[in-house]
């Protein structure tokens, strides 16, 4: 058993968590599973924990949010421990770097700039400073550091925003909608005349343009799709409940019956919606 008393100190805060992680990763006395992990194997858990944080916020489940934020913090500590072992950086250096970045990017709070600016003004300034930082790192390409690991819809929007900054963008939503119609026609053509690879490519093109429309309408496509998923789940559960009241299951009913129950659930939602 590890002997660091900090591990068992209930008020040890993040220092205690770091001590626990060091003990888990100890090559002689640690946990075999934790010892075997690397950045690539842990990264999916990091992404999953971030989504679970968002899910708790969406549901306004504050006790769950506390737990999920703890899980996400553990991921940061995990990566920092592995980085320190490999000699890349330390927890102290990463906290110092993010603190310095926050100071540099908020000169209206920590420096001499006026605070007489809106949140929108600050967003513009933030992006300007990020662009300057990219230039200083010799990343000359407009799209160079848009993370590959982002969810595809989110990355599509970020790529399009970057391109729009240098003028590569449709000026209005009308042209985007025209492009959606064009891509839909090409998908139909691929379905009727081409193979699976071409169909997948055309489907991807259509999704990419849909993401562009979301950007023009100032809609978060990830949030919009999550809302659509939630709506589908809610209405399908209503179908299941209605059929269960008849001692039936969806597989025991016809599509027409389920469509009718779907429409009934949709109508109830409209009646119950706040006005």
Image: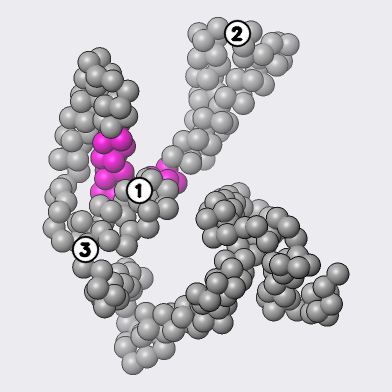
Distance from the alpha carbon under mark 3 to that under mark 2: 56 Å
- Name the residue at 60% across, 20% down: 239
Mark closer to the chain start, 1 or 2:
1
Placement of 37 over or under 89, stated as above or below: above
Type of secondary structure dominating the magenta stretch: helix
Side of 262 relative to 209 (left or right): right
Q: Is residue 275 visible?
A: no
* Disc 3 residue crowd, few under 14, some 14–19, many 20+, Cα 10 Å: few
Placement of 213 over or under 183, stated as above or below: below
* Disc 1 residue crowd, few under 14, some 14–19, many 20+, Cα 10 Å: few
Q: Write down the residue under mark 3.
A: 141
Give the numbered dot on residue 253.
Answer: 2
Q: Is residue 115 visible?
A: yes
Mark closer to the chain start, 3 or 2:
3
Q: Magenta segment range?
A: 203-224
Q: Position of residue 49 (x, y in %)?
A: 59, 54
């Amino acid at each position: 058993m590890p002997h660091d008393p900090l591990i068992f100190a209930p008020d040890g805060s993040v220092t205690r968590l770091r001590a626990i992680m060091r003990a888990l990763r100890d090559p002689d006395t640690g946990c075999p599973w934790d010892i075997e992990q690397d950045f690539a194997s842990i990264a999916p858990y990091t992404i999953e924990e971030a989504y679970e944080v968002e899910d708790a916020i969406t549901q306004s489940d504050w006790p769950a949010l506390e737990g999920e934020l703890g899980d996400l913090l553990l991921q940061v500590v995990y990566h920092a421990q592995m980085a320190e072992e490999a000699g890349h950086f330390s927890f102290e250096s990463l906290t110092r770097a993010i603190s310095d970045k926050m100071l540099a990017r908020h000169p209206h709070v920590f420096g001499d700039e006026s605070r007489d600016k809106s949140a929108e003004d600050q967003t513009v300034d933030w992006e300007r400073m990020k662009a300057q930082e990219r230039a200083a790192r010799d990343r000359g390409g407009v799209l160079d550091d848009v993370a590959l690991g982002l969810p595809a819809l989110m990355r599509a929007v970020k790529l399009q925003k970057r391109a729009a900054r240098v003028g590569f963008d449709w000026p209005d939503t009308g042209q985007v909608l025209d492009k959606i119609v064009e891509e839909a026609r090409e998908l139909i053509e691929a379905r009727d005349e081409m193979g699976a690879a071409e169909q997948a490519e055309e489907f991807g093109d259509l999704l990419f343009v849909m993401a562009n429309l979301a950007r023009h309408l100032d809609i978060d496509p990830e949030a919009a799709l999550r809302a659509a998923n939630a709506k589908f789940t809610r209405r399908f559960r209503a179908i299941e409940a209605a059929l269960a009241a008849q001692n039936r299951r969806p597989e025991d009913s016809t599509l027409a019956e389920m469509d009718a129950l779907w429409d009934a659930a949709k109508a109830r939602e409209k009646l119950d919606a706040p006005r």
